[in-house]
Amino acid sequence: MYAYKENDTWIRTVVKDLTVETGSGLIILDPLDISGGYTSVKEKTNISLISTDICIHLSLGGISLLLNLQYQAAAALQFGNASPLAPCINFDRIWVSPKENGSHNNLTIWRPQAPSNYVILGDCVTSSPIPPSQAVLAVSNTYGRVRKPVGFKHIGFLSHVLGLEGVDGHTGVDSDCSLWMPISPPGYISMGCVTNVGNHPPPNHVVYCLRSDLVTSTTYSECLLNELPNQHFTSGFSIWRLDNVLGSFYAHSSIAYPSKGNSSDLSHLLLWNSVWSYASLQEYIPDTVDNNHSCQQTSNQGDSSSGWDILRSISKASSCYMSTPHFERIWWDKGGGLRRPVSIWRPISCPGYAILGDCITEGLEPPALGIILKSEDPEISAKPVQFTKVAHIAGKGFDEVFFWYPIAPPGYASLGCIVSRTDEAPCMDFLCCPRMDLVSPTNIIELPISRYLSSKASHCWSIWKVENQVKIMLTQ
């Protein structure tokens, strides 16, 4: 009932025999009467609510129903994802170089798999057939943060870049991979290139552009491909990885360093407002790494045992080591001829911990995870007594590098080599040798990961990968 006169208002509502019943006939709320009133007279307001006795039957089924209703109501009222960012740890392989393409036969294009209600901002490229070792970030598609591109600018075909045409100068269109740069709408920025198999641009829903106020500039971390001029690209062609949390890349028809205006990353404000900061991404990596490691261990059980496996289960109980996803690159060889690309990385340690050796990977990407050991407890580790130089590698196409093997004190073990760019023994403070009873024998892969001839052609140096959690190496 409703009535009003001039500025005065009177409202009354009555509900008779209100009851709540489930579909199975279970009564949750006994019938009750509710009456409500509202009056506003001469700027005085009065609100009243009166009901008969309330009797609620809360069985387990009733509680489950109420919780389900609460969840559905909360979902209906939620206007977007709580976090603007989410990690992508799975990737779809879009294209891989044919094996007959010589030194570039490991170039691979990947597309991150974004979670529901999140989108990617570009494809990823690696120098090996292994997907990116680090998780990349996807952005929530709510609040206008991202928009679809209005089109795509064609950059080139990888067959033309790598010289994969047949004898007639053509290649299979359906199997060729084309490179594209998204054309962003006004107020948005393209964050990296995207690929598509064939000569048509990709659908505009596979990649998005980011709002310009959420973008900051970054640098190019490395050049993954640098091809000299040919009939298709008179200025050459190069592919550059961006130093960002998206794992994106930039390609252009030149061997020159790209313009800084094409290198973008997520702004720090967006990262700070997200529970998925770049550092916390790495929490998703260890399980994957451990699974891969266990498979490798199983397949190599029949091999000859040599080297050391790091840290038995006793070490976990004493918390004598910790994992780290952060590395600095010490050296790399981009490959050429019969040489495969390899790179050497050093885990970034923290106070009170030290590394166990440098890590080697096939390709130019860092390992997914490294291990550092407590260095201030003699019950766990000790500094090496000295370093012995075991190899000196120099040649065309890569920088000079020296390999050193740490000599462990009695009762401790050396796990692998470390490298330096000068002919001076490394500092002993950042490396440690674990106690002998904390390690166990492991395997070395049957074939060396790389071989090099010395400048005098009197020595042949081989780098061997030790199959353990820290991916260390031995050189001879």
Image (spheres, helix red, strand yellow):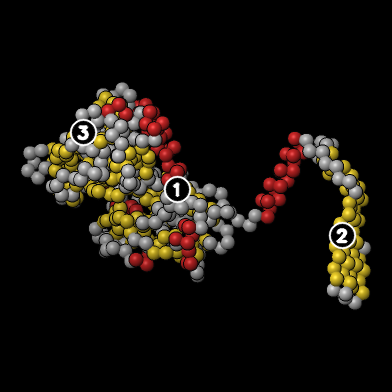
Q: Amino acid at mark 2?
A: Ser
Q: Position of residue 295 (x, y in %)?
A: 39, 30
Question: Circle 2 sits in a helix, a strand or a loop, which is it?
Answer: strand
User: Which residue occupies 34% across, 66% down?
Assistant: 260
Q: Is residue 383 above or below residue 33?
A: above
Q: Position of residue 191 (x, y in %)?
A: 43, 60
- Is the residue marked by circle 1 packed among few (<14), some (14-19), or many (20+) residues within 10 Å? many
Q: Is residue 362 left or right of residue 132?
A: left
Q: Amino acid at mark 3?
A: Ala
Q: Position of residue 199 (x, y in %)?
A: 42, 55
- Is the residue marked by circle 2 packed among few (<14), some (14-19), or many (20+) residues within 10 Å? few
User: Which residue occupies 24% across, 31% down?
Assistant: 413
Q: Is residue 23 visible?
A: no
Considering only order in the chain, which callout, 2 or 3, is on the residue closer to the N terminus?
A: 2
Q: Position of residue 348 (x, y in %)?
A: 32, 47
Front tag of 3 and 1: 3
Name the foreground residue: 154 vs 413.
413
Q: Is residue 131 left or right of residue 213?
A: left
Q: Which residue is mark 2?
A: 48
Q: CA distance from mark 3 to mark 2?
A: 84 Å
Q: Is residue 144 above or below residue 312?
A: below
Q: Tell me which corner region of the image, top left, top right, bottom left or bottom right, holds residue 359.
A: top left
User: Which residue occupies 28% across, 45% down?
Assistant: 346
Q: Quadrant of the C terminus?
A: top left
Q: Which residue is mark 3?
A: 408
- Is the residue marked by circle 3 packed among few (<14), some (14-19), or many (20+) residues within 10 Å? many
Q: Which mark is residue 281?
A: 1
Q: CA distance from mark 2 to mark 1?
A: 53 Å
Considering only order in the chain, which callout, 1 or 2, is on the residue closer to the N terminus?
A: 2
